[in-house]
Amino acid sequence: MTDQDRFNWHADARLFAGAAQVPRPGAADVPAFLQIAASPTGACLTRLTAQIAARGSFCVSDGTPLTDANVPPTHFVTLTGGTTGQPKAILRSQRSWAASFAQNAVTFGIGPEDSIAVLGRLSHSLALYGVLEGLQLGADVHVLDALSPRAQIAHCLRHGVRILYATPTQLLRLARAAKGQRLPDLRLILCGGGPLQATGRDAVMPFAPNAALHVFYGAAETSFVTLDGANTPDGSVGRAYPGVTLKILDEAGQTTDGVGEVWVHSPYLFDGYLGAPGSEAGRRDGFVSVGEMGHLDGNGQLWLRGRKTRMVTIADQNVHPEEVENFITDLPGVTACAVLPRPDALRGHRLVACLEGPADPALTAEVTEACRQSFGPLVAPRTIHFFNDFPRLSSGKTDHTELTRWLEGRP
């Protein structure tokens, strides 16, 4: 076991919870495993770094109790997003993330001259990843989840933040709050947790004119899978991240050039679900699948269709609501969208679109027509509802389970 296999706090790195600097931990007795509350942020970081310094294992969460805490000291636990159900506890080795820290140091040149900001709560794996990577590579790390978007911009400007870890929702909130302000020192934005549509990219770049924007696709179980770049075509999630091997298998388990299930092999994979060894992710010959459907083109670009578990049948067609969701999100005037299936006695299912914001009959007509032109009348959402505020998880993702409950109370 080497330092490259464990999380470490580099001698050059500093850590901040908002404006408050987090002191380095002294020698202390800590439990072998500790479940750490994500809030308040300063207390979370203090307990997290003490656990790391003492070589203990941990899980940062919003209070979801772990039923089985048999976690080796070389490992840690994160939780899945839980957008469509209960979060699952992900058991992974510290080595699995440390390997990608080393790769990002090479790919993006991250090091002690950098300062990194994360915008989300540490219960979300993207924010936790950004903190641990920065500490390991010697960068200053600023955790800004307790600040408003406007205050986050002011903090980044004041401290010359150079690298930002954020979800698409967090980036769009920053873009709306910027109001002409710019972050000229920002050189790199790493965006994960969902697709960032073309309109989102256009909104982000004015406040970060000198930043390279990279959106990566991954999952809690796989970590990095693909990374986009300047030559990534619209709609693709990019090519395999360094060290990742991809294959697409059909229903018979054979490699296919068409649409099939995406399987991933890499040094970054999780070990399993804590307390649920037979849960949803599939394993085969060292590859893992989380049920994502897609295809690889001749240039190695991965194109996703959606999760197999969200696929529905409409008039004998297999339909992925995520495709419609992403299409609508990229339309003018749409700030956030969720597309959900509802039972239909004649066709099996129908789709319903939920848009964030006040009711807008003109936007309803425009979205309906655009969807009919692109997907046809059977697949296009039959109804469009507006909600002033979407229910969201701590990651910033839409809570589809709660949104479905809302829909059940509507005609």
Image: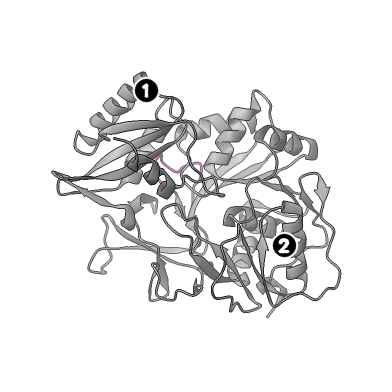
Is residue 237 depicted above or below 10 in this figure?
A: above
Measured in 3D between alpha carbons, the distance from the residue under mark 2 to the one under mark 1, in whole angstroms, is 47 Å
Q: Amino acid at mark 1?
A: Leu
Which residue reaches farthest front? 409
Label 1 SS:
helix
Residue 324 in which image quadrant:
top left
The magenta-colored residue range is: 229-236
Q: Which residue is mark 1?
A: 363
Residue 36 in which image quadrant:
bottom right
Identify the residue shown where x is 23% and y is 39%: 379
Q: Position of residue 262 (x, y in %)?
A: 36, 60
Can residue 225 be seen? no
Identify the residue shown where x is 45% and y is 49%: 238
Is residue 369 depicted above or below 195 in this figure?
A: above
Disc nearer the start of the sequence (2/1): 2
Q: Residues within 10 Å of mark 2 (few under 14, many from 20)?
A: many
Q: Which residue is mark 2?
A: 136
Which residue reaches farthest top? 362
Q: Position of residue 23 (x, y in %)?
A: 85, 58
Quarter of the rendering occupied by the C terminus = top left
Residue 251 is a magenta residue? no
Is residue 282 depicted above or below 234 in this figure?
A: below
Label 2 SS:
helix
Identify the residue shown where x is 19% and y is 37%: 378
